[in-house]
Image (spheres, rainbow, N blue to C red):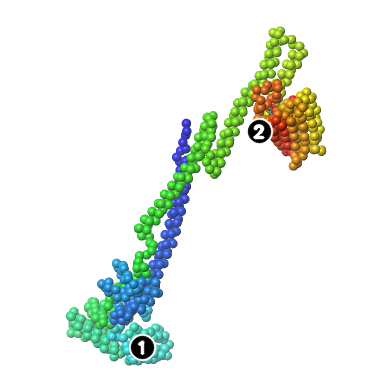
C-alpha cells in the first residue's frame, strides 16, 4: 500500500511556503522602502511647492497693495511662473480670468483657489503657515488689522517730502550716535517715511535729539490723515461713540468728551468700536488705491494640480493589488515548480517500492537535470540489481548442477560395485578419483571466489621473473597442448621485473592458457607474450581458436557463464576460470580484459603494476595448490 507523504512534510508545500515567505518579505521590504522614500520625496516636493507658493502669494499681494488694478501685472505673473515652474492664474472673485502666466487655452481651474489676494483683508493664517516675511521684514502674521502695510494709498510721500524727512532722520541718527554712542539705523517704510531704529539709545536721548520735521506729519500725510479722521469721525458718530484723535501710526488719543472717558487704547472699556471704525475707515480710504480682490490659482504646467504620487487610499489599494498579483504569480510559479520537482520523486519512490516487492522497477527519464540524472542512475542500478539477482539464481542452479554430475557418477560406480555389476579394479578407482578431483576443483574455485568476494584474497608479493613464470606455465600445459595438436609459444621482451605472488600469477595465466588450448583446433597456436607498457607488465595469452562473439565477450567474466551452455563439465571448465583470473589480477592491483574475432582467435590481456600493489601482502587464507 502506498503511504502518502503527510501534508506538512510535502516537498511541494514546503517549497511553496518558502517561496511565499520570500516574496512576502521582499514585497514588504520593497513597499516599506518605496513608501518611505516616496514620502520623503513628496514632503520635500510639497515643502518646495509651499515655499514657492508663499513667495508668489507675497509678491502678488505686494503688487495689489501698490497698484489700483491688475492690468499691469502680466510681467510680474510671468516672471513668478518662470521662477517656480508653475502656472499662475489670477481671476476675479467670480473666477473670470484677469492675468494668466501661460498663453493658450485657459487653465482648467481647480475647485479651490490657492489663495485670495486682498491687501485690505490679508489672510494671516496662510501668511503665518508660509512664514514668508513681507517687505521690510514685517511678518505678515503680525499685522493686526489684516491690512497689508505696503498699502499706503494717499500716505505715499512725494519725492520732495521724502528727501526732507530723510535729511532730518540722518541728522537725528548722527546726533544719537554722536551724543550717546547708540546704534541708529534708518529704514524706509512703505510710504517712504524713514524709520529710525534707535536700539540701545537711552530714554532721554529722544528729548536731546529732537527733530520737529521728523515728528510732525508732512503736508501729504496731514492731508491724508485729515481725510481719514473725517471718515473715522462719521463712523463713530454713527455708532454713538465719543470722538478720538488719530495719530500718524493709526493709534488714537481720546478727545475730552462730555462724559469723561479715560481709556485710550483699543482694549479699553469702549471695546472694539474704535478699532473697528479705524480699520474700516482705512479700508475705505485705501480702496481706490489698491487692486480689487482677486483669486490666485497656482497649478502645475499641465494644468493638473494633483500631486503625481501620494499614499491616498486609491494608491494604497493599487499597491495592495500589485502585491497580491506578485504573490499570486509566486504561488503559481511555486506550485508549478514544486509539482515538476515532486512528480519524478514520487515516481522514483513508487519504483523503489516496486523493487522492494520484487517487481520490475524503472522510471521515465525526462530532462538532464539533477532529477533526470537521479532517475537514470536509479534505472542503471535497478538493471544491475536485476542482472545480479538473475546471476545469483543461475549460480545456485549451476553450483547444484556442477556438483551433481560428478557426485552421481561416483555414486553410480559405487552402487554398481556394491551390486557386483562392476569390478572395483584400479581402473574404476582411478576414474572415481578423477571425478572426486573434479568435484574438489569446483569447490576450490568456488571458495577462491568467495574469498575474493569477501575482499580477503591476499597475495604474497615477491620479485618474479616473468619469462621464467611463462616458461613454467607453458611446461605445465605442454602435454595437454601436444595432445590437442596445439603449439605453445612463449616470448618475453627482455628482462621484466615484477613484484607479484608467483603462485597466484601462475594460477591466473594457467587458467587463460587452458582455456586457449581448449578452444583452439589442432594445428593452432597459443602464444604467451610479455612486455612492458606504461610502467605495467602486460601478459597476453593469444590463440588462433574459435573466438568469442562480440555480444558474449563481456559475459565471459561472469560466473558459470559458458558460450556452449549444454557443454558438459568434462569437456570444458567450470565456468569459474575467467572470473577467478580477473579477481587474481585485481588483487594484484591490475586488470584482465579480452579482445576477440570470431573464427580468428582471442587475446586475453593481463595487466599488472610492475612494483606490486599496496594491498598485496599476505593475511587471508592461503591455498596455493589446486
Ligand atoms: P570454463 O571453465 O567454461 O572455461 P571460463 O570462465 O574459463 O570457464 O570461460 C568462460 C567461457 O568463456 C568458456 O566457457 C568459453 O565459452 C569462453 N572462453 C574462454 N576462453 C576462451 C578462448 N580462449 N576462446 C574462446 N572462448 C573462450
Decide if residue 503 is on the left or right side of residue 281.
right
**Mark 1 or 2, closer to the camera:** 2
Rate crowding at label 1 as few (under 14), some (14 to 19) or many (20 or more) other CA atoms within 10 Å.
few
Q: How many marks?
A: 2
Assign a secondary structure to mark 1. Answer: helix
Residue 315: image quadrant is bottom left
The answer to whether the residues at label 1 and label 2 have Cβ atoms under 8 Å apart is no
Residue at image position (41%, 90%) is 174
Measured as percent of width and height from the top left, residue 562 is found at 66, 27
Q: Residue furthest top?
A: 420
Judging by the rendered image, the residue that carries numbered circle 2 is 550
Judging by the rendered image, the residue that carries numbered circle 1 is 206
The residue closer to the viewer here, 128 or 524, is 524
Q: Looking at the image, can residue 371 be seen?
A: no
Measured as percent of width and height from the top left, residue 398 is found at 64, 23
Tag 2 or tag 1, which sits nearer the N-term? 1
- Residue 36's tag is none
Measured as percent of width and height from the top left, residue 302 is found at 36, 68
Residue at image position (24%, 81%) is 284
Amino acid at each position: 500500500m502506498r503511504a502518502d507523504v503527510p501534508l506538512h512534510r510535502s516537498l511541494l508545500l514546503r517549497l511553496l511556503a518558502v517561496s511565499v515567505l520570500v516574496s512576502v518579505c521582499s514585497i514588504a521590504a520593497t513597499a516599506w522602502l518605496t513608501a518611505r522614500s516616496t514620502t520623503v520625496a513628496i514632503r520635500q516636493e510639497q515643502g518646495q511647492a509651499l515655499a514657492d507658493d508663499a513667495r508668489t502669494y507675497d509678491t502678488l499681494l505686494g503688487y495689489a497693495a501698490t497698484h489700483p488694478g491688475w492690468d499691469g501685472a502680466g510681467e510680474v505673473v510671468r516672471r513668478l511662473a518662470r521662477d517656480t515652474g508653475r502656472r499662475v492664474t489670477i481671476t476675479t472673485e467670480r473666477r473670470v480670468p484677469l492675468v494668466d502666466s501661460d498663453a493658450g487655452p485657459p487653465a482648467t481651474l481647480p475647485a479651490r483657489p490657492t489663495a485670495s489676494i486682498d491687501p485690505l483683508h490679508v489672510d494671516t493664517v496662510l501668511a503665518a503657515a508660509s512664514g514668508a516675511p513681507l517687505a521690510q521684514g514685517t511678518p505678515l502674521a503680525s499685522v493686526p488689522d489684516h491690512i497689508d502695510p505696503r498699502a499706503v494709498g494717499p500716505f505715499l510721500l512725494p519725492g520732495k517730502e521724502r528727501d526732507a524727512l530723510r535729511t532730518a532722520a540722518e541728522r537725528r541718527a548722527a546726533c544719537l550716535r554722536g551724543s550717546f554712542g547708540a546704534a541708529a539705523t534708518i529704514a524706509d517704510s512703505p510710504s517712504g517715511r524713514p524709520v529710525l531704529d534707535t536700539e540701545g539709545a537711552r530714554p532721554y536721548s529722544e528729548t536731546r535729539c529732537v527733530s520737529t520735521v521728523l515728528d510732525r506729519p508732512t503736508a501729504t500725510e496731514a492731508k491724508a490723515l485729515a481725510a481719514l479722521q473725517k471718515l473715522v469721525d462719521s463712523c463713530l458718530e454713527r455708532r454713538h461713540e465719543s470722538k478720538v484723535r488719530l495719530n500718524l501710526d493709526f493709534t488714537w488719543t481720546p478727545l475730552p468728551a462730555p462724559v469723561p472717558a479715560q481709556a485710550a487704547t483699543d482694549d479699553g472699556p469702549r471695546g472694539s468700536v474704535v478699532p473697528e471704525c479705524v480699520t474700516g475707515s482705512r479700508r475705505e480710504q485705501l480702496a481706490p488705491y489698491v487692486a480689487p480682490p482677486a483669486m490666485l490659482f497656482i497649478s502645475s504646467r499641465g494644468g493638473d494640480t494633483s500631486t503625481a504620487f501620494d499614499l491616498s487610499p486609491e494608491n494604497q489599494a493599487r499597491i495592495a493589488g500589485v502585491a497580491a498579483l506578485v504573490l499570486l504569480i509566486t504561488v503559481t510559479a511555486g506550485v508549478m515548480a514544486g509539482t515538476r520537482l515532486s512528480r519524478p520523486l514520487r515516481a522514483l519512490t513508487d519504483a523503489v517500492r516496486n523493487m522492494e516487492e520484487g517487481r520490475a522497477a524503472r522510471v521515465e527519464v525526462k530532462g538532464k537535470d539533477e532529477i533526470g540524472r537521479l532517475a537514470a542512475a536509479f534505472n542503471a542500478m535497478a538493471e544491475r540489481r536485476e542482472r545480479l539477482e538473475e546471476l545469483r539464481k543461475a549460480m545456485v542452479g549451476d553450483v547444484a548442477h556442477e556438483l551433481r554430475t560428478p557426485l552421481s557418477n561416483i555414486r553410480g560406480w559405487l552402487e554398481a560395485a556394491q551390486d557386483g555389476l562392476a569390478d572395483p579394479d584400479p581402473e574404476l578407482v582411478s576414474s572415481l578419483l578423477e571425478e572426486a578431483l573434479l568435484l574438489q576443483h569446483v569447490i576450490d574455485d568456488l571458495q577462491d571466489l568467495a574469498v575474493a568476494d569477501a575482499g580477503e584474497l591476499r597475495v604474497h608479493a615477491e620479485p618474479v621473473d616473468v619469462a621464467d613464470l611463462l616458461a613454467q606455465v607453458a611446461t605445465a600445459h605442454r602435454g595437454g597442448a601436444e595432445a590437442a595438436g596445439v603449439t605453445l609459444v612463449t616470448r618475453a621482451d627482455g628482462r621484466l621485473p615484477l613484484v607479484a605472488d608467483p603462485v597466484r600469477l601462475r594460477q591466473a595465466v594457467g587458467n587463460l592458457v587452458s582455456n586457449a588450448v581448449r578452444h583452439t583446433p589442432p594445428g593452432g597456436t597459443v602464444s604467451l607474450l610479455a612486455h612492458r607498457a606504461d610502467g605495467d607488465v602486460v601478459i597476453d595469452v593469444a590463440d588462433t581458436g574459435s573466438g568469442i562473439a562480440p555480444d558474449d565477450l563481456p559475459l565471459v567474466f561472469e560466473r558459470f557463464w559458458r558460450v556452449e551452455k549444454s557443454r558438459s563439465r568434462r569437456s570444458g571448465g567450470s565456468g569459474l576460470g575467467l572470473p577467478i583470473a580477473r579477481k587474481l589480477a585485481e588483487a594484484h592491483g591490475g586488470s584482465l580484459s579480452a579482445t576477440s574475432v570470431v573464427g580468428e582467435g582471442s587475446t586475453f590481456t593481463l595487466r599488472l603494476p610492475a612494483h606490486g600493489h599496496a594491498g598485496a601482502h599476505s593475511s587471508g587464507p592461503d591455498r596455493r595448490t589446486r
